[in-house]
Image: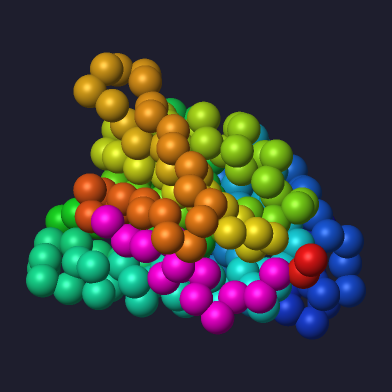
Amino acid sequence: MTTTALLPLTLAERSLASDELCVPATFEEYLDFAEQCQYNVEYINGEIVSMSQASLPHESLVGRLTTIFNNLFDDDDTVGVFSSNIKIHVSITGNSYNADVSIVNGEPDYLRLPSGYLSTSEIKNPILVVEILSKSTQAFDLGDKLEDYKLIPSLQQVLFVSQEQSWVSSYVRSETPGVWLNTSAHASTDTIHVLGKPINLGQVYKKMKFNS
């Protein structure tokens, strides 16, 4: 029995399991399993990892941001906006993440394994990634995952978007190697910049209702 046999394949089976599942696996086993299962998985430090499944506010924000970004870069044929079905591969660490939204400038640089296999669901050259924060993932996303993302040479910006409150945190690569500039926005009238283009925070959270 392979280790991936310990993981559920269907979304219905996954909904009955614990919030977080971690199973040791090779990267090849991870790729094979990711193609078969009905939910998103990541590969982190030699393990296939499945976090709790996305909430309605999470999906609403993903759809909202995807629309905003597509409109923002509609006149630029070189820019592509992708959902979490396209995974972000960090070559230095070997980890792969399901960024909720990613942006690529130019042709995607797909992951090619030493065997010659080309994975068209894994890219290595995003210029921006977005993570929608939840209570269960926030500490990891703002910690280890952010540090991993910073190792991607092409990456220019990381956006963290809260689904619990009106709050966006942006990390932008500076001209000084290893230095990223962090800014946050809270009010609906605040402006955040996406790859240098301004958007209003009220646009991001339009129609969103938060628990008091």
Q: Residue at x 10, y 71 (%)?
A: 75
Q: Residue at x 36, y 19 (%)?
A: 178
Is residue 28 at all visible to an observer of this figure? Answer: no
Instruction: Judge left or right: residue 66 versus residue 76.
Output: right
Estimate the x, y position of residue 104 in percent, counting from the top left: 26, 56
Is residue 47 at all visible to an observer of this figure? Answer: yes
Instruction: Inspect the magenta stretch and tell me whether residue 172 lies in it.
Output: no
Estimate the x, y position of residue 39 in percent, counting from the top left: 65, 71
In the image, residue 39 sits, relative to residue 107, either above or below, namely below
Estimate the x, y position of residue 115 in percent, counting from the top left: 38, 46
Quadrant into which the C terminus falls: bottom right
| Closest to the observer, 117 or 160 | 160
Estimate the x, y position of residue 130 in percent, counting from the top left: 46, 54
| Closest to the observer, 66 or 84 | 66
Image quarter of residue 120: bottom left
Instruction: Inspect the magenta stretch and tell me whether residue 199 lies in it.
Output: yes
Extent of the magenta region: 198-210
Q: Residue at x 30, y 40 (%)?
A: 156
Instruction: Judge left or right: residue 140 versus residue 68.
Output: right
Q: How is the image coloured?
A: rainbow
Quadrant into which the N terminus falls: bottom right
| Closest to the observer, 35 or 147 | 147
Q: Residue at x 28, y 26 (%)?
A: 174
In the image, residue 150 sits, relative to residue 192, either above or below, namely above
- Counting every numbered tag in the picture gives 0
Image quarter of residue 175: top left
